[in-house]
Amino acid sequence: MTAFKTLLAVLYLLLLPLTLQAEKPNILWIISEDNSTYLGCYGDPNANTPHLDALAAKGMRYTNCFANAPVCAPARSTLFLGMHATSAGTYHMRSRYLVPKYITPYFTHLKDAGYFTTNGKSDINTNTHNINRMVDAKSVPKQYLGRPDKSKPFVAVHNMMQSHESGIFVSHPKRTIRNPTPGKKLEHPLTIPAYQVDNAETRLDWARIYTQIDNLDKGIGQILNSLEKSGEAENTIILYCSDHAGIMIRSKRYLFDSGTRVPMIAYFPKKWEHLAPKGYAPGAVSDRLVDFTDIPKTILTLAGAEVPKHFVGKAFAGKEEPAKEKILLFSGRFDECPDNSRALTDGRYKYLRNYESDRQLNQLESYCFNQISQQTQYKVHQAGKTNEAQASVYDTQPVEAFFDTQADPHEVQNLINSSEHQELIAQFRSELDQYIIKTHDLGFIPEPLIAEIDQSTTVYEWAQSQENYPLPEILALANTTGQSDAQALERFTNALSNSNRIIRFWGALGLRVAGDKASGTQDLLKKALKDSDASVRIVAACTLGQFGMNQTDFLLNEAKIATTDAHANWALDALKLIGVSELPDGLEDQDFIKGSYSQRSYEDLRDGKTYTKLAN
């Protein structure tokens, strides 16, 4: 019997490593909404965030984590699909365009690896995948902590709404706000960014934000408390980040750090510290560059799950990989307001290129004007009482910008013409082009065409064809927008006769951005009004309208014949960009509204609102 017991003991010792190897960690991922590093652990004295501060004190806090997009749905698409939303075709705000079924969210691979999965928000900006059907349950603690099979590890994703932008609204398009969030009494001096007017309304909105941050921390505390009581805390890795940065003026929807730099904390219990990042220790701070393509890949790595080929991130834990040297940031349409900008950051320096530099930086988007501070700053500006930094919010965008975010954290000093930075700027400029090509950025396809393609196939698959989407050639032309010398104008006019509709579009856009200096191209633009492509027609009409030729009927007809929201919205948006503030009498509203965003643009026009003037 003694010999038998000895044999069992030996077998146990031999099999123990295999048992440990088979065991996997739980992963709890908490994602807050719309908040930057307004936390105590990031040095903000007005934030009362004891739970997040305690998590940072026992884990690792990251100082260079970036949301690739400064708005929720495109940022969440990047998180879930593990690839830049610009590569998938999901970068326009709530566009929901299809992606190929083989571009799968990380949940698919976690389930294959034996995980019980839960999720909060399912809006990943595509209709291809129904996240609610892909996970085992919604993310409430009783679901994953009380899962039927406790032998299964869990990955639970919580989305925390307490800090969402709508919480500081005084009005809302879909509901009545009877009790707006009260402003917290701030105990420490508040630094108002240079580009915001320092008045009572701005300070009240900031105070409301800190109320929300405190409530966010309380909600996170409840989740962490449930985990602790369950007895599973020692087996659970915890990740925390925000879905993008802040919500005040020139934050959300902008590629500045105020819209993209987010807090991130990672905690590994002792049992799983061997999976932690290098240098991990209680209270450690990492300056590693992390973006939203890195987090899902890291989670799959920690879970021992298969990492699909389309995941482009760099794992920062588990099988840790070298960090990226620079991070790609991008913007597309924000609700009803088209935009097209890209940026590259190394955590300190940032290069930013605006491909539609004739657009106002703040396009007076309807949703965010529910903030009282947005309303009052606009009124102060209209009264001519803003300083240069505050007025720049309502200026047209620069073609290029370059910032030293260490010396200038509010990014108000554009160094693009700085002689001492030219070599560095040239490097960033070249590398941005390389990133765009490498990631096969689909953001140079006009959205009406994307909407058209989406009715028969995915834009991702359509754009794999060099004939359909010759990206290097398109990018070379797009990089010329903002120039108005004779050589550039000749390139744009030549592009109007190209067989590729996207190149024709960029030719028309180059002329629009060139403004009055392109007035000699009117005859060519009139011909472009008959182009087979809607985006070319719309941009040509918009340009002619800016030359003083009335295009209201033409653009209204474009909206009327449109079969997609994107097509109609672009036509109506062109009227707003021209500055048309009065529509003809006798219009039937339903003729021009093809979806939620064309509805907003149409209502703006009907109310007399343009991109430089609010409704009366």
Image (cartoon, rainbow, N blue to C red):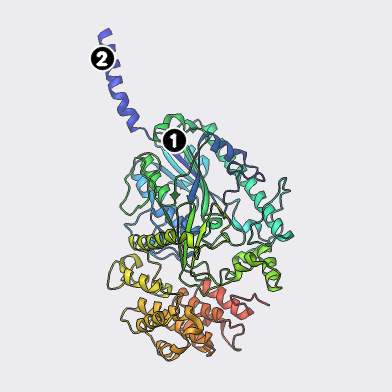
Q: Earlier in the sequence, mark 2 or mark 1?
A: 2
Which numbered dot is residue 239? none
Quarter holding the C terminus is: bottom right
| Residue designated by label 2 | 7
For this view, does 616 lie left or right of residue 610? right
Going by the numbered disc 2, the residue's amino acid type is Leu
Residue 200 is situated, as x and y percent measured from the top left of the image, at 74, 59
Q: CA distance from mark 2 to mark 1?
A: 41 Å
Q: Residues within 10 Å of mark 1 (few under 14, many from 20)?
A: few
Q: Residues within 10 Å of mark 2 (few under 14, many from 20)?
A: few
Look at the picture and state if 524 lies above or below 248.
Answer: below
Look at the picture and state if 477 lies above or below 437.
Answer: below
Look at the picture and state if 301 lies above or below 581.
Answer: above
Counting labels gives 2
Label 2 sits on a secondary structure element that is: helix
Name the residue: 59% across, 55% down. Answer: 164
Quarter holding the N terminus is: top left
| Residue designated by label 1 | 279
Question: In this view, which residue lies farthest toward the bottom?
Answer: 523
Tell which tag, 2 or 1, sits nearer the viewer. 1
> Is any atom of residue 534 visible in this view?
no
Residue 589 is situated, as x and y percent measured from the top left of the image, at 56, 81
